Image (spheres, rainbow, N blue to C red):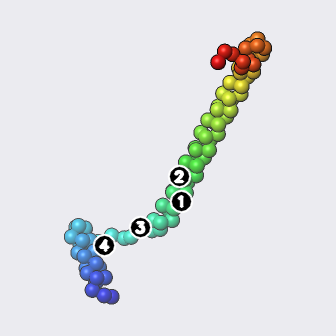
Amino acid sequence: MNDSQAGAAALAAWLSSCCNQSGVQPEPPERPHAVQAVVLGVLSLLVLCGILFLGGGLLLRAQGLTALLARERRASRETEPSGASSGDEDS
């Protein structure tokens, strides 16, 4: 062990004895990385599903509005007189 590792170990021992008044050394938590990985995976899946469902709903709504606009344009073209839609107005 080199000097920096020995210094870090001594500092950690001093902090645990200083701040822990019970005299019992704190035990390291068991498998915190596995639990964190599982929680992160579940949250990521929830966010992904939320984005897909909300995005899909917005896409369907946009397609419905586009279809409605196209129907309105078609209906307005059918009701216009044939001379007005030719584009040969006074320029």
* Amino acid tagged 3: Pro
Q: Which residue lies under the disc numbered 2?
A: 43
Which of discs 3 and 2 lies nearer the camera? The answer is 2
Using the numbered discs, state the Cα–Cα distance from disc 4 to disc 2 in whole angstroms.
Answer: 34 Å
Using the numbered discs, state the Cα–Cα distance from disc 3 to disc 1 in whole angstroms.
Answer: 16 Å
Q: Which residue lies under the disc numbered 4?
A: 25
Q: Which residue lies under the disc numbered 3?
A: 29
Helix, strand or loop at mark 2? helix
Asked if residue 90 is positioned above or below residue 19 in the image, the reply reads above
Asked if residue 61 is positioned above or below residue 18 in the image, the reply reads above
* Amino acid tagged 1: Val
Of the numbered discs 2 and 1, the one sitting upstream in the chain is: 1
Of the numbered discs 3 and 1, the one sitting upstream in the chain is: 3
Asked if residue 72 is positioned above or below residue 51 in the image, the reply reads above
Of the numbered discs 4 and 1, the one sitting upstream in the chain is: 4
Using the numbered discs, state the Cα–Cα distance from disc 2 to disc 1 in whole angstroms.
Answer: 9 Å
Of the numbered discs 3 and 2, the one sitting upstream in the chain is: 3
Of the numbered discs 4 and 2, the one sitting upstream in the chain is: 4
Helix, strand or loop at mark 4? loop
**Quarter that holds the N terminus:** bottom left
Answer yes or no: do the residues labelled 3 and 1 have beta carbons within 8 Å?
no
Specify the farthest residue to the bottom. 1
Q: Which class describes the residues within 10 Å of circle 3: few (<14), some (14-19), or many (20+)? A: few
Using the numbered discs, state the Cα–Cα distance from disc 3 to disc 2 in whole angstroms.
Answer: 22 Å
Residue toward you, 14 or 43: 43
